[in-house]
Amino acid sequence: MERRNFIRALIAVAIGVPIAVEGVTFSRLFYQRLTGAEPSHDRPTGEGVDVGEDLLPATDAGETVTEMSLEAAGETEWTFRMVVDVTNPTEQAYRLKLGPVSLGDGSTVGETISTGEMAPAESTTLSGEWTVPSGSTVTGIWAGGKTGEDSVTERVLLAPIEEPA
Amino acid sequence: MEIHRYEKIWFVIALLMIVGFIATIAYGAVGAGVEMIADDGGTMDPNDVSGTEFEDPGVRQVGEDHYEVYVLSQQFLFRPGTTEPIRVPAGSTVTFYITSTDVMHGFALAGTNLNVMVIPGQVAKVTVEFEDPGEYGIVCNEYCGNGHHSMEGKVVVVPESQYEGP
Amino acid sequence: MSAESPFVERFPSEARIVRLNLGVAFIALFIGGLFGAIQSLHRTGVYRGLIQSSDYYSMLTAHGVLLALVFTTFFIAGLFHWGITRSFDRNAPSQWFSMTWFGVMLLGTVLATIAILGGLIPFAPDDLNAAVLYTFYAPMKAHPLFYIGAALLIVGSWLAGADWFWSYFRWRKTNSDERIPLQAFMVLVTWLMWYLATLGVATEVVVFLIPWSLGIIPAVDPLLTRTLFWFFGHPVVYFWLLPAYFVWYTILPKLSGGRLVSDPLARVSFVLFLLLSTPVGFHHQYLDPGIAEGFKFIAMSNTMFLLLPSLLTAFTVVASMEHGARQRGGKGLLGWLRALPWDEPAFAGVALAGLMFAAGGFSGMVNAGMNLNYLVHNTQWVPGHFHLTVGTAAALTFMAISYWLVPQVTGKRLQLKGLAIVQPYLWFLGMTLMSNAMHRSGLAGVPRRTAEPEWNAVSGIAYETIVGSFQETQLQIAVGGVLLFVSVVLFSMVMFGTFLVRADLGPIRVSGSLPRPLSTAEDGPLVLDNLRLWFTIAVVLVAIAYGPPFFDMISDGVFWPGTPPTTSGL
């Protein structure tokens, strides 16, 4: 009798767990398809740029983030605001372009703003506001720094930003 | 030869399923227009890239929204792609030409359908459309030696407003 | 045939050949399985302290070669030697010749294994390595011993087939009107397919890679050698699968308590495999440059038709199991399943292997889908698939049927039967966990054949998984891999114990007799036994599928575009 129960328990675990695992996989796949829920995006690897840090370390110019925030702007929208202090210590002209914004669901929203051409030793502040759907996770922002003829264009990862209250 | 009625039914279902599968793949090829990598990239001498585009691999603009990217795969990096990301603008059509001068490699944008074998002597030619901005990781997915696991790269699809040219 | 004395008493010399082959197979299984466990801990990041990532590839080569070439070939040779002897009920034509083919296979195995393990042993000479993986694509070069060893293993297997065809021709002389006994038929058809299939890899290794690795020829065309490999690389999976079908058709019905419902349908499925296994190799090269899309399309449709004999097998085998279950008193639409002997290790393992194969077959259908292949090629989806097929349908069937066969070829009772009962269930559980996670991570683009799949050279990139995170799939793979290794350990303990126990502990408890099928060989058309006809058609189909592409590749020069050997390290 003991052996029969052992076999039953063995079958229950050895076949039951696989059925459960496959069943859960299948139903989650189906659920994702039916509801259009987004695939899980693991947060991209790497540390995000935070307030006080340089946006594009690859350029000799300095692009220091002084403000990075999200504020509610109505029922369905939030405003993402970023302010960058830009200095050009090089001997050449420098230009920073900022935006669009990259969101956690993979989409890209908004316009691009520019410092315009900065002479050597010039500094300026670039600030911009982008409208994003409420509930979005802002994961990054496109930034392009052009020193003379060389340009560096990246989707810069940003540190997590506090959601509006 | 005696065949049970159920088995005859099963046999018919099996054939229908097989024909159905062939039809869906044929639709993908002919209807949806998903082309397979073929031999139109041509061949070249893998021991000597001089005189070919692979002597100076990189991105070239060949039309208003059309770009060509010549990628040289070597143990253990993509040129371009690894030390310098491959940058193309969103909304462009890009034709990749990929080859190797040492061993077999793979060139795949993880999570997408851009996935090709890279064989010395053969040029893999594949054309894709990049609609939206984003970043893709290039993974070498064919074993190429003891540094294989570090052979990675990036394709950056830059928003048009940010694109500075090839 | 009712009570008969065990095989080892009727055919002691043949039984010895079987034991030798199984012994080598089981040793290869243990070592290959151990390496698999280490790999599953390493690449998932769970524990990387056992080996360096740069050595991972020598270990992976050993895992692939020992399991997919050595364990399989030796087990199959032992199983088929038993099957042929049993079918014709007479001794092998020459015990010396049988020993010779075993010896050639073993020599080849030892040489290749030395080359591979040289890459893992610190004090071995620098050039003694074969970190080329089981597919050994040029221009990556292994030590010449690797290629020579591989060639000897293949040649040894050809000689094994000659042994069995020799038996067949001798039997024919005194049985000119009889149908070929079913097990012998299956052995001969499998080996006809094998002879055709190995032409590709034998040409690749003997004509190109051995001379190239010795420096006799300076360059080979990597596309040509790769194509020659895959000419062999697809039918080899049927070389692994048909022996499992051999078990499912001829022994599983008896283990289920019944009979095979149809002998002719079993023959039909084997004939279809002989015809279709080889002209499909391009489905492993869907994403290769240098091969026109038309050839790939033909391979795709041929491959889809290869589903047919497997689907037919599913029906016949399940019907036979149901027949057996109802003989045992099983009732109801599905309730008969409970009447099957799930506490018998041989039955349970073979049945679970068959069940798991259904899943593997379906993921294989995806692989066959030419343009779908973009999404799964060289991702972890592929090992997810083949661990279900060769790794379970074949390997678990082989392990499980050993519980039934080894007593008959040793004359000893199965030892540690409690462990044997648990082993197949543990395998099934471990394999589901591992393979499920491999399929899921593969769909996110996680590559196969790498020591470190995580992104470490670029930042800002993450795998987009659909169900569960990347980390979670990796952990699941590690858990599954460890459970599988525990299962291999249990199997090895049972076999070791049984081989080593004293022989005089009483008669063995299994009966080797196999009942007649419900629909016998005589009920099927004579043409099924016309091996010459089927082999000829198989050759014609291969000529059509491969003739034009090979001509294309060779017409610009057999050795062009050519590459010299390159090593695996910098």
Image (cartoon, coloured by chain):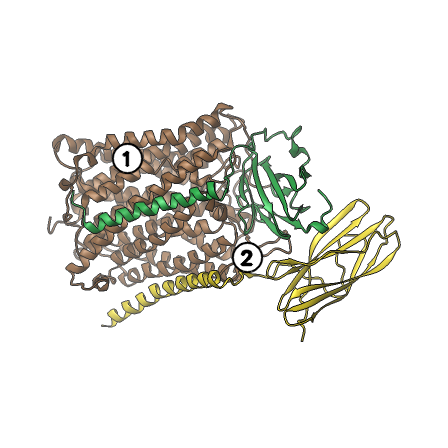
Chain colours: A yellow, B green, C brown
Residue B100, image x, y percentages: 59, 36
Residues marked 2 and 1 touching at CB (< 8 Å): no
Nearer to us in this view, C461 or C505: C461
Amino acid type, mark 2? Glu
Name which quarter of the figure residue A74 lies in.
Answer: bottom right
Element under disc 2: strand
Residue visible at 70% across and 53% down?
A: A154
- The amino acid sitting under disc 1 is Gly
Residue C424's place in the image compared with C290, above or below, is below
Residue at numbered disc 2: C464
Q: Would residue C43 be found to the left or right of residue C396 on screen?
A: right
Who's the residue at 85% across and 59% down the image?
A: A124
Q: Position of residue C485 (x, y in %)?
A: 40, 57
Picture layout, residue B70 above or below residue A26:
above
How many angstroms separate mark 2 from mark 1 (CA)?
49 Å
Q: Secondary structure at mark 1?
A: helix
Left or right of residue C384, residue A87 in this image: right
Mark sitting on residue C10: none
Q: Quadrant of residue A87?
A: bottom right
Q: Is residue C471 left or right of residue C421?
A: right
Label 2 Cα crowd, 10 Å radius (few <14 / some 14-19 / many 20+): many
Q: Residue furthest left?
A: C2
| Residue C251 appears anywhere in the view | yes
Q: Earlier in the sequence, mark 2 or mark 1?
A: 1
Q: Looking at the image, is mark 2 or mark 1 nearer the viewer?
A: 2
User: Can residue C505 be seen from the camera position used here?
Assistant: no
Name the quarter where the C terminus of chain A is drawn. Answer: bottom right
Quarter of the picture holding the N terminus of chain A? bottom left
Q: Mark 1 = which residue?
A: C161
Circle 2 chain: C
Which residue occupies the foreground of this view, A137 or A113? Answer: A113
- The percent coordinates of residue C323 (x first, y second) are 18, 56
